[in-house]
Amino acid sequence: MKWFTIGSLTLPASHLALILAFIAGGVFARLRYGKECADIYSNAVFLFIAVWKLSVVLFSFSLVLQAPMSLIYFNGGVKGVWLALLMNLLYSGWKWPREQMTALIFTWMVVVIAKEAALPILNGEFTLMLVIQLAGSLVFVTKWLNSLFNQSNRLILFTLWQIFFYSWNGQLFSMTVLAYSIVAIFWIWNERRESVG
């Protein structure tokens, strides 16, 4: 994993890739779906980062008591990511307009595509398999699939496409695959719950 220095800030490639993915998602939401969706999206991103960063208080309270400045330097780690993901799903499910679930799902797909593109490029691991993965991923956000699949089926296929490439690389049981799966299951459940109720 490479590290990048931006001014006095040093970030691992994974954090920088996630920041770039969040920016790509925000630009996509703003350009394609308007200000309301972009505002909710940016609030969700802020919530994710804040919960992840401040969750160090929950998971390492004694450290924060001994050194309050640790809030600046540390984060909640893996537990913090899961807590931030949970809070983000709950917030987005509550705030995102029901009639614009397609916008939410497509914005999520753009974030995943941007992250999957940025991380290997930042690490200098650009391969033919990555090109195939990204090309296939982009097909799922194009309009010409609208007549073939509804948004839930498209999200399922998109998630399975990502899982296929993670399994190809021997990472089938990685945190990323679990996170992608949880997000897809949550949004499909949420969409079907809304359509039934």
Image (tube, grey):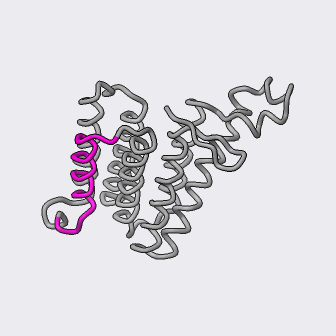
Considering every residue shown, the one lying at the far left of the view is 148
Front residue of this view, candidates 176 and 8: 8
Q: Residue at x 54, y 51 (%)?
A: 19
Residue 121, image x and y in percent? 40, 45
Residue 131, image x and y in percent? 25, 47
Q: Is residue 19 left or right of residue 51?
A: left
**Total residue callouts:** 0
Q: Residue at x 28, y 51 (%)?
A: 155
Q: Is residue 184 left or right of residue 87?
A: left
Q: Residue at x 36, y 35 (%)?
A: 177
Q: Is residue 37 left or right of residue 112?
A: right
Residue 144, image x and y in percent? 17, 68
Q: Main secondary structure of the magenta part?
A: helix
Q: Is residue 107 left or right of residue 85?
A: left
Relative to residue 162, is residue 7 depicted above or below?
Answer: below
Front residue of this view, candidates 121 and 111: 121
**Which corner quadrant of the image does residue 69 belong to?**
top right
Front residue of this view, candidates 101 and 79: 79
Q: Residue at x 67, y 35 (%)?
A: 75
Q: Is residue 73 magenta?
A: no
Residue 122, image x and y in percent? 45, 43
Relative to residue 125, is residue 62 depicted above or below?
Answer: above
Residue range highlighted in magenta = 126-144
